[in-house]
């Protein structure tokens, strides 16, 4: 005899099916280009420029993006970049790695993220803005692992690129409550989809074999004080993410350092927030034209 399912059981089964589908999409994401893992060891051992260039040139799409991004004043630091060799020489190890990681990440942020009501390139520009803020803040606070912080900040919302379609179907009405401040986005995602973009981002970063501290920071960029390790890294990305999201709302920028325990813990004051805002405005004004994802 077949028993009729109760409403609670139907809802649980529905969530299980959605979650399984989400995880399948995440598993089918193209792997993060291994050019990053090939170049970093070469930079560490100070390999000849030609050897580094040959690895970057192997992927022509990535090479083109690296060259384009390298022409941005934020990365090139007032020197002209006309070739990959110029980029390698002028940028140096850490900036070159940042440019390569940024160039590699563009492919995952193509098109609108309509489920989260974001316009073309908006999520990508937010991700880059968060990475720049996180890097500037890490240097301002004299933190170590600046490249780790930049990388995790750049990829902190990677989970949203997978959840987008599901958000469009299941989060449409809830997003209004999130905007009004009546519900947190993480809570909304978990309630509707049984997973949030932090947790999914952690899963993706792990599959892409990023270092554990990057995985932890992505997994806790909304809840850094809950992280069992690398709280400073996660907290820096949390602050950068909050500031990148509030940059056009001056009254919010005034409230954040006063009310937020993570800001207090890191020692992020109003003067630091103002300094970060100015540096981000300068950087993004220059870099936006180089952020095309086509």
Image: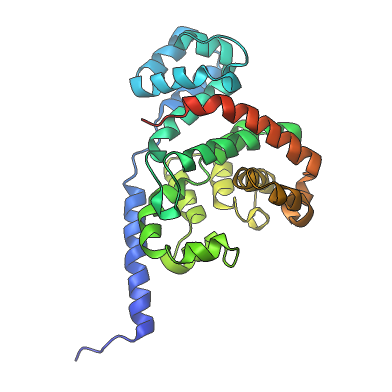
Q: Is residue 249 left or right of residue 158?
A: right
In the depicted view, which residue is nearer to us: 123 or 57?
123
Report if residue 59 is visible in the image: no
In the depicted view, which residue is nearer to us: 252 or 31?
252
Report if residue 161 is visible in the image: yes
Name which residue lies at 46% across and 45% down.
158
Q: Which quadrant is home to the N terminus?
A: bottom left
In the depicted view, which residue is nearer to us: 15 or 276?
276
Q: From this viewpoint, which residue is outermost toward the left?
A: 1
Q: Is residue 83 left or right of residue 262?
A: left
Q: Position of residue 184 (x, y in %)?
A: 57, 62
Name which residue lies at 62% across and 56% down.
223
In the depicted view, which residue is nearer to us: 245 or 24?
245
Q: Position of residue 60 (x, y in %)?
A: 34, 19
Q: Position of residue 193 (x, y in %)?
A: 42, 64
* Vertical position of residue 179 compared to residue 235: above or below: below
Q: Which quadrant is home to the C terminus?
A: top left
**Colour convention of the picture:** rainbow
* Vertical position of residue 258 compared to residue 90: above or below: below
* Vertical position of residue 88 compared to residue 10: above or below: above
Name which residue lies at 45% across and 9% down.
83
Disc tally is 0
* Vertical position of residue 247 compared to residue 57: above or below: below
Identify the image quadrant of residue 6: bottom left
Q: Position of residue 288 (x, y in %)?
A: 51, 29
Q: Is residue 242 left or right of residue 156?
A: right
Name which residue lies at 45% across and 17% down.
67
Q: Is residue 156 left or right of residue 275?
A: left
């Amino acid at each position: 005899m077949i028993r009729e399912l109760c409403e609670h059981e139907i809802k649980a089964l529905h969530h299980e099916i959605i979650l399984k589908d989400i995880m399948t999409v995440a598993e089918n994401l193209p792997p993060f280009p291994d050019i990053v893992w090939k170049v970093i060891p070469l930079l560490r051992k100070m390999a000849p420029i030609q050897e580094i260039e040959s690895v970057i040139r192997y992927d022509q799409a990535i090479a083109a993006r690296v060259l384009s991004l390298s022409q941005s004043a934020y990365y090139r630091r007032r020197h002209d970049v006309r070739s990959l060799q110029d980029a390698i020489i002028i940028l140096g190890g850490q900036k070159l790695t940042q440019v390569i990681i940024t160039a590699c990440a563009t492919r995952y942020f193509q098109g609108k993220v309509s489920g989260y009501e974001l316009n073309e390139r908006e999520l990508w520009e937010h991700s880059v803005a968060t990475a720049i803020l996180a890097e500037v803040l890490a240097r301002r606070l004299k933190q170590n692992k600046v490249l780790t912080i930049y990388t995790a900040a750049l990829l902190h919302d990677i989970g949203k690129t997978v959840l987008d379609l599901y958000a469009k179907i299941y989060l449409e009405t809830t997003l209004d409550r999130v905007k009004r401040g009546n519900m947190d986005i993480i809570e909304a995602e978990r309630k509707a989809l049984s997973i949030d973009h932090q947790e999914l981002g952690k899963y993706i970063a792990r599959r892409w074999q990023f270092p554990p501290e990057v995985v932890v920071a992505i997994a806790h960029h909304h809840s850094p004080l809950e992280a069992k390790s690398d709280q400073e890294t996660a907290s820096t990305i949390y602050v950068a993410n909050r500031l990148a999201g509030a940059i056009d709302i001056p009254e919010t920028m005034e409230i954040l350092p006063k009310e937020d325990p993570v800001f207090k813990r890191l020692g992020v004051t109003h003067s630091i927030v103002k300094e970060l805002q100015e540096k981000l405005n300068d950087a993004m004004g220059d870099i936006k034209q180089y952020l095309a994802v086509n």
